[in-house]
Image (cartoon, rainbow, N blue to C red):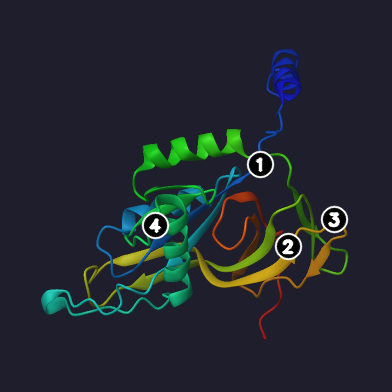
Amino acid sequence: MKALRVLAAFAALVLPGAAVADPAPPVAVELFTSQGCYSCPPAEAYLGELAGRAEVVALEWHVDYWDDLVYGGAGKWKDPFSSKAATLRQYAYNRAIIGRARAYTPQMIVAGEREMVGSDRSRVEDAIRRARKALPQTVALTVEPAPDGRIAVQASGGGVTLWRVDFLKTHVTEVLRGENKGKRLVSHNIVRRLTALGPARADGLVLDPPAAGEGCAILAQVGESGPVRAAAYCPADGVRPPA
């Protein structure tokens, strides 16, 4: 790692203006949110910014425990993207990180190891920096286009499970009831499916591409809710056409 830093510094001095590849791997940042939560839209907007950054794999999970909340005369709003799976994942993370199944929104989980309020940009940015410095290099993850239009995944390193996360890239919702009544919410990388692919394997996997309008990411994670040792988006050019 020291040699890489020296090489990068040398290239910056010798070749002004030349792009130097960042050797640190991307960090998984997961937002737990709900369209029924008044304080969540700023965190969702921030996640949209993170989704455009190369050093982050950003995912948005919509929990279901806000769906039955009645907010005075505005009534209740069932988040169309909410799921029990998202809620259970949040519970599992918090049991692992803080020792209890705490549930609140908006909550960010960085690299499966640190949690904070999702709209607290300074804490999130600090957690991303720390995670990129601390990520072990024992797990090597490569996600590339396969010649037949599918997705080739190679991973080496022990102690992790590979997970495929399929997500809706972006969606605009006009909220008609509940705490966010009258708001127009823009969401990014909304998780729709989580699929276990098994342990990391150097011989590789070939996966079908996501559906039109969707993307996917691969996580190399300790168990179901442990630290995320590596993360990568699926290639953007591998997308199934609409049925």
Q: Quick check: marks 2 and 1 in contact, CB under 8 Å?
A: no
Q: Position of residue 134 (x, y in %)?
A: 59, 35
Which residue bears the numbered disc 3?
A: 202
Q: Quick check: marks 4 and 3 in contact, CB under 8 Å?
A: no
66 or 74: nearer the viewer:
66
**Spatial CA span between label 2 and label 4:** 26 Å
Work out whether 5 lies above or below 102: above
Mark with earlier residue (2, 1):
1
Circle nearer the viewer, 2 or 4: 4
Q: Position of residue 186 (x, y in %)?
A: 40, 63
Quarter assignment of residue 105: bottom left
Q: Quick check: marks 1 and 4 in contact, CB under 8 Å?
A: no
Mark 2: amino acid = Asp
Circle nearer the viewer, 1 or 3: 3
Which residue bears the numbered disc 2?
A: 237
Mark with earlier residue (1, 3):
1
Q: Residue at x 62, y 65 (%)?
A: 215
Mark 3: amino acid = Ala
Work out whether 40 lies above or below 65: above
Q: Quick check: marks 2 and 3 in contact, CB under 8 Å?
A: no
Q: Position of residue 44 (x, y in %)?
A: 39, 57
Work out whether 22 lies above or below 142: above
Q: Residue at x 45, y 51 (%)?
A: 97
Mark with earlier residue (2, 3):
3
Mark with earlier residue (4, 3):
4
Which residue bears the numbered disc 1?
A: 25
